[in-house]
């Protein structure tokens, strides 16, 4: 087992994250596997997260009744705190209060876990919510540890681009919190070169070297190519013809109107939108007259491989201007399942580059129905070429985005921060007295 970089008697790694298994949020899946890889490398890890709530935006049955739940594990501990959830994403004040309340509770438990104020090797905090950045800094300071701030989406940029936040005072406060959170971290990790450029542009020159690119990953052993004739096809009466699938958050960041527009022009093709979110009700209303558009809520994580196999072509849509502040990590999962990707996303950003490098799909301009339908028609007209794209994407993911590779990247960063911290540590030496005059 690898020796941990910290000094004897330290508590190891403290992770502050909004979701963790068994919560079904994508960021929870990411952090759960990163923790597993760090444990495999010999680290002890103490996770502070929320009670499971992502699926229905309410604490799940079996987890209610207590604000704080703790469990010991073979590799450390998990502390779960109340997330103060709400299902109205338009109520920004309610969401902000919830984030602050959760971050405060998480911070207290981050100090308490494995002994009050004992030194840690490192603290890792995940955003969103952005408020965990300063929480992480407080915990790291009192634990005498460096802070790694993991950015999944750049906030508030994404919310501004989609119009979710328009109040200038709210925007100013959020941008201030973003800047000081980046500056407070010893390292900031982002998922792509686009996000790295975005974050670096908000830091002074001396601090830009703190930004590191570590992509999310996909478990290629669990998600792999499967037969297209799945149970979901039968359950949803999708037939044996081509299925164009979107799976994920049905929000205002995703250009899912493209799927509805394409369905009107391609009545012989089935379109499956699998997920939930703030935009689902309005999207269902716009597709109410289309028998070839089917909606379904989130499936259990155990059925993810089946879901991915159900689609012959998968759609990754993101509204114009958002690709530099948010990376759809679902792209890796689609490629791991051996299915071609049709991305409607800003040119020159991470996903189009991945598709170009891998040959795993096609990218078109965002929010352009004509370009989207033209690319989709091309894929549908040549099923053998589409299958070949899926196979190429699978090979690329196996080579470039494995969990072990991501775990090693975090392990190396933790070791680097530990070395830097030891080099900067002041050496308090007693100054020898001058020899007496003779």
Image: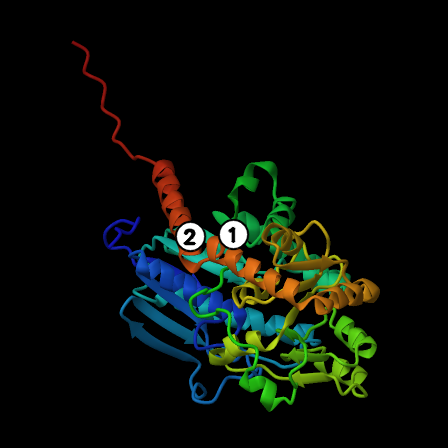
Residue bearing mark 1? 189
Residue 323, position as x, y percentages in the image: 68, 57
Q: Quadrant of the N terminus?
A: bottom left
Residue bearing mark 2? 410
Is residue 388 placed above or below 65 in the rendered structure? above
Q: CA distance from mark 1 to mark 2?
A: 9 Å
Residue 209, position as x, y percentages in the image: 53, 40
Q: Residues within 10 Å of mark 1 (few under 14, many from 20)?
A: many
Residue 235, position as x, y percentages in the image: 59, 90
Q: Quadrant of residue 80?
A: bottom left
Q: Nearer the viewer, residue 327 or 375?
A: 375
Q: Residue furthest left?
A: 438
- CB atoms of marks 1 and 2 within 8 Å: yes
Coloured how? rainbow
Q: Is residue 110 left or right of residue 325?
A: left
Q: Nearer the viewer, residue 343 or 202?
A: 343
Q: Is residue 161 left or right of residue 298?
A: right
Q: Residue furthest top?
A: 438
């Amino acid at each position: 087992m690898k020796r941990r970089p910290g000094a004897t008697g330290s508590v190891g790694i403290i992770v502050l994250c909004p979701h963790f298994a068994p919560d079904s949020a994508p960021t929870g899946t990411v952090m759960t596997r990163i923790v597993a890889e760090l444990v495999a490398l010999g680290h002890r890890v103490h996770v502070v997260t929320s009670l499971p709530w992502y699926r229905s935006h309410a604490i799940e049955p079996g987890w209610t009744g207590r604000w704080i739940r703790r469990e010991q594990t073979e590799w450390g501990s998990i502390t779960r705190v109340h997330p103060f959830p709400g299902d109205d994403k338009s109520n920004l004040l309610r969401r902000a209060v919830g984030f602050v309340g959760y971050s405060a509770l998480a911070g207290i438990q981050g100090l308490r876990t494995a002994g009050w104020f004992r030194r840690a090797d490192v603290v890792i905090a995940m955003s969103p919510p952005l408020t965990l950045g300063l929480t992480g800094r407080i915990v790291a300071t009192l634990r005498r540890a460096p802070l790694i701030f993991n950015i999944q989406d750049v906030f508030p940029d994404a919310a501004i681009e989609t119009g979710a936040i328009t109040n200038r005072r709210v925007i100013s406060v959020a941008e201030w919190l973003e800047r000081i959170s980046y500056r407070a971290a010893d390292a900031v990790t982002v998922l792509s070169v686009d996000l790295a450029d975005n974050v670096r542009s908000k830091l002074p020159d001396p601090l830009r070297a703190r930004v590191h690119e570590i992509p999310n990953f996909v478990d290629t052993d669990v998600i792999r190519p499967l037969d297209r004739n799945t149970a979901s096809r039968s359950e949803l009466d999708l037939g044996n013809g081509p299925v164009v699938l979107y799976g994920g958050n049905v929000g205002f960041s995703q250009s899912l109107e493209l799927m509805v527009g394409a369905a009107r022009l391609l009545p012989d093709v089935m379109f499956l939108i699998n997920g939930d979110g703030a935009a689902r009700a309005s999207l269902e209303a716009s597709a109410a007259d289309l028998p070839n558009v089917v909606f379904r809520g989130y499936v259990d994580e155990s059925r993810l491989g089946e879901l991915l196999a159900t689609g012959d072509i998968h759609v990754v849509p993101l509204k114009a201007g958002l690709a530099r502040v948010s990376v759809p990590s679902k792209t890796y999962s689609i490629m791991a399942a051996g299915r071609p990707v049709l991305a409607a996303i800003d040119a020159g950003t991470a996903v189009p580059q991945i598709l170009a490098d891998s040959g795993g799909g096609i990218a078109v301009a965002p929010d352009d129905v004509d370009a989207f339908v033209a690319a989709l028609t091309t894929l549908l007209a040549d099923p053998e070429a589409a299958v070949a794209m899926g196979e190429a994407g699978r090979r690329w993911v196996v080579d470039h985005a494995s969990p072990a590779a991501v775990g090693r990247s975090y392990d190396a960063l933790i070791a680097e921060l530990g070395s830097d911290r030891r080099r900067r540590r002041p050496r308090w030496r007693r100054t020898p007295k001058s020899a007496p005059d003779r």
